[in-house]
Image (cartoon, coloured by chain):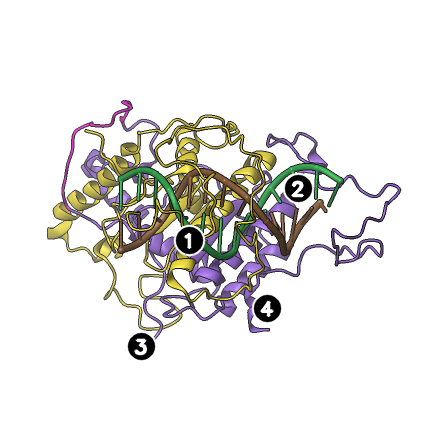
Chain colours: A yellow, B purple, C brown, D green
Amino acid sequence: MEDGEASTITCLPTTKQNPNLLVNQKKESKEQKPKTTKGRQKIEIKRITEENRRQVTFSKRRSGLFKKAAELSVLCGAQIGIITFSRSERIYSFGNVGTLIDKYLRKTPVMLRSNRGGDVPTGEENNDGLMWWERAVESVPEEDMEEYKKALSALRENLLTRIYQMGNDRTAENLPAFPNDMAMADWKLTNENLMARNNRGYVGNDAGLDFGVPFMSQKPRQ
Amino acid sequence: MEDGEASTITCLPTTKQNPNLLVNQKKESKEQKPKTTKGRQKIEIKRITEENRRQVTFSKRRSGLFKKAAELSVLCGAQIGIITFSRSERIYSFGNVGTLIDKYLRKTPVMLRSNRGGDVPTGEENNDGLMWWERAVESVPEEDMEEYKKALSALRENLLTRIYQMGNDRTAENLPAFPNDMAMADWKLTNENLMARNNRGYVGNDAGLDFGVPFMSQKPRQ
DNA sequence: CGCTATCGATAAAT
DNA sequence: ATTTATCGATAGCG
């Protein structure tokens, strides 16, 4: 913003807001503006190649999508969860995803069909390639049980910690209240998602995050 | 046409073919209509009480939401999954939910840091109110371990079963470059979910589980 | 440097 | 006609 910013870029009239005044100001300037933009344009629904533009579009449309989802949720009292991965593997989620995943998976009531571990129809689905925690419990050697238990516990701890970590709110001013279907915390977080500005930190390709919550920030609040 | 596919689930909405309303509407036409519609109206975002209207709204907006999601997906090459439960517990999903849930859950790498301690800011982190599977493993009495293990195992089985039951949506496992389309199977699944109401039997309530089990298939190629 | 907020203008939806 | 969702461009914030 150093170069060329102050010096009025091209077509923008100087009636533009002064960067110095970041406070919300009434744009009283109802004056004649020399047509600065081309307005909303029609775009084809196809992969956006330009990296930059795609990024911006992703951000904007995702916001729009989440907003819609929130509205639908409120209007109809429906539970909605959205999971989104950008191309850079960054995750963005909306709603109480964890709960919904749970319900989703439970569409089929539990019945103890005794098809054991490697039953996958696609073949070659032995335990190889599975994470330790997704392996059948029986496959854990008795002597490793102790460690296994510890690990499971740690896993749970991490999840809970993550969930509770997101206790920092950002003052959701004038947002409607969610029906009691959605937990307050979730709603707050969703709001963060909606207006969120802070979202980084957990990125990369691991350094994970959540489970049941749509949050963005990762600030551990110390 | 290829983008037609991309352009969303589309097609399901609107059978609106009002002869009066031509598609092309230029603002130049100053024709005074005696009394057409009141145009788009603003509605308050609050729970719709009237059962009927809410149902309709749910249907319409869900379509709209899915459409948006599809567009976003195509435009930005992002993976998107939406899970929706209506008040009547009917499920509607969009996208390759299975894969996304998998990725979502996998986003939490297991770190064997056993940071214990009830550091939960909000307090009340006792085991009460937790489902059996989310309780600390240590809290399981030794004599119950056997059963616990069985349960965990059954859990995993069910998840796997569930996943494969809901169809072959593992197409987009790690779709490389995003062609402007979502996997066919996924679309089919989405559409099925959209129109087919064959989602019954998932009753379920209570006991949820979800976190530690990624399930889902392995790499497509073998 | 990458992602989000804002703005003017306009396409889209109702 | 009126409200909403983007678009392109850019300022702002981490």
Q: Is residue A205 above or below residue B85?
A: below
Q: Is residue B118 magenta?
A: yes
Position in image of residue B196 (x %, y %): 63, 57
Position in image of residue A216 (x %, y %): 33, 41
Position in image of residue A17 (x %, y %): 43, 36
Quick check: do tags 4 and 1 share a chain? no
Which disc number belongs to residue A56?
A: 1
Real-space Cα separation, disc 4 to disc 1, in angstroms: 23 Å
The secondary element bearing badge 1 is classed as: helix
Going by the numbered disc 4, the residue's amino acid type is Gly
Q: Nearer the viewer, residue B65 or B113?
A: B65
Q: Residues within 10 Å of mark 3 (few under 14, many from 20)?
A: few
Q: Nearer the viewer, residue A32 or B109?
A: A32
Which disc number belongs to residue B222?
A: 3
Quick check: do tags 1 and 3 share a chain? no
- Left or right relative to B103: residue A135: left
**Residue placed under numbered mark 2 in the picture:** B57
In the image, which residues are magenta?
A: B112-126
Q: Residues within 10 Å of mark 4 (few under 14, many from 20)?
A: some
The secondary element bearing badge 4 is classed as: helix
Q: Is residue B69 above or below residue B117?
A: below
**Residue placed under numbered mark 4 in the picture:** B4
Position in image of residue B176 (x %, y %): 36, 70
Real-space Cα separation, disc 3 to disc 2, in angstroms: 45 Å
